[in-house]
Amino acid sequence: MNTLIKSMKVFPALPELLSYLKDSFIHTMRESIERQGNCTIALSGGTTPQIFYKTLAAETQLPWDKLYFFMVDERFVPFGHADHNFTTIQKAFFDLVPIPPQNLYSIDTSLTSASLAAAAYDRSIQQFFKVHSPQSFPSFDIILLGIGPDGHTASLFPGTSALEEKSLCSISVQTNSVKHERITLTFPVLNNAKNVFFLVTGADKQNILRKICVEQADYPAARVCPAQGSRLFILDKSAAPLEALERL
Ligand code: 6PG
């Protein structure tokens, strides 16, 4: 059996999926805090994870002061805009829990360009993790990713030069595939994570998951494969390729 199918976990219904993902997060948070005193987490925007953020917000007993949240990517629109990832996550999650504001690392979209915002984010990541790219990259304890129907993940879109970035933690991306300019973490960062979770639900994702996980076609999401860490595809039944359903 091919390795990508082995890294899929398929759930017949959303409540079980959410509870599994929540438990995995909490387990990793505890382990990381025990090991290094904190847990660093990068969250994706988009629609799919919003319900998971609400699930996490209901967990009142998390060690909030030891959790540090970063953005996987951002759309270059002002704070408060309906398409702004940080604002959306703030409403569903951060605003509902007692997390110290200094533990939240957003991308500054009030700067004059997406490339300046990406450079500022790159610097704050380097400072927080005490790393100095291009030689070294942060190792997030958890990165939560989604997959777009075109195979993008984070804001790493097919055919963009961002896919080739090897030096920076964060860069800006311009592509006709989406409405707004983006800022995204790069592959060296995604592939240096300790735990990557892909959260993918809905029948409209079955086709791309099949191409990535069964046919092993070269899409951006397929290039996320942490060298030292784990990668898990968490899927609902409607998104799962048939080959994965056979294992249910
Ligand atoms: C964003 C993302 C993006 C997202 C995928 C999947 O800002 O949109 O971070 O990479 O994860 O587009 O989005 P859905 O899960 O909502 O389909």
Image (cartoon, rainbow, N blue to C red):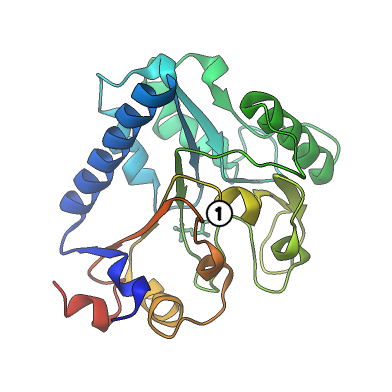
Quarter of image, res 30? top left
x and y, in percent, of residue 135 in the image: 75, 43
Above-or-below relation of 171 to 107: below
Q: Quadrant of the C terminus?
A: bottom left
x and y, in percent, of residue 129 in the image: 62, 28
Above-or-below relation of 43 to 181: above
Farthest-out residue, bottom: 215
Amino acid on which disc 1 is placed? Asn
Query: Viewed as shown, does residue 3 lie left or right of 41?
Result: left
x and y, in percent, of residue 44 in the image: 50, 47
Q: Quadrant of the N terminus?
A: bottom left
Quarter of image, res 128? top right
x and y, in percent, of residue 132 in the image: 75, 35
Residue 109 visible in the displayed image: no
Label 1: how many residues lie within 10 Å, few (<14), some (14-19) or many (20+)? many
Q: What residue does disc 1 label?
A: 191
Q: Residue at x 22, y 53 (%)?
A: 17
SS state under label 1: loop
Q: Which residue is drawn at 29% across and 70% down?
A: 6
The front one of 175 and 231 is 231
Residue 187 visible in the displayed image: yes
Q: Residue at x 39, y 74 (%)?
A: 204
Q: Residue at x 60, y 38 (%)?
A: 138
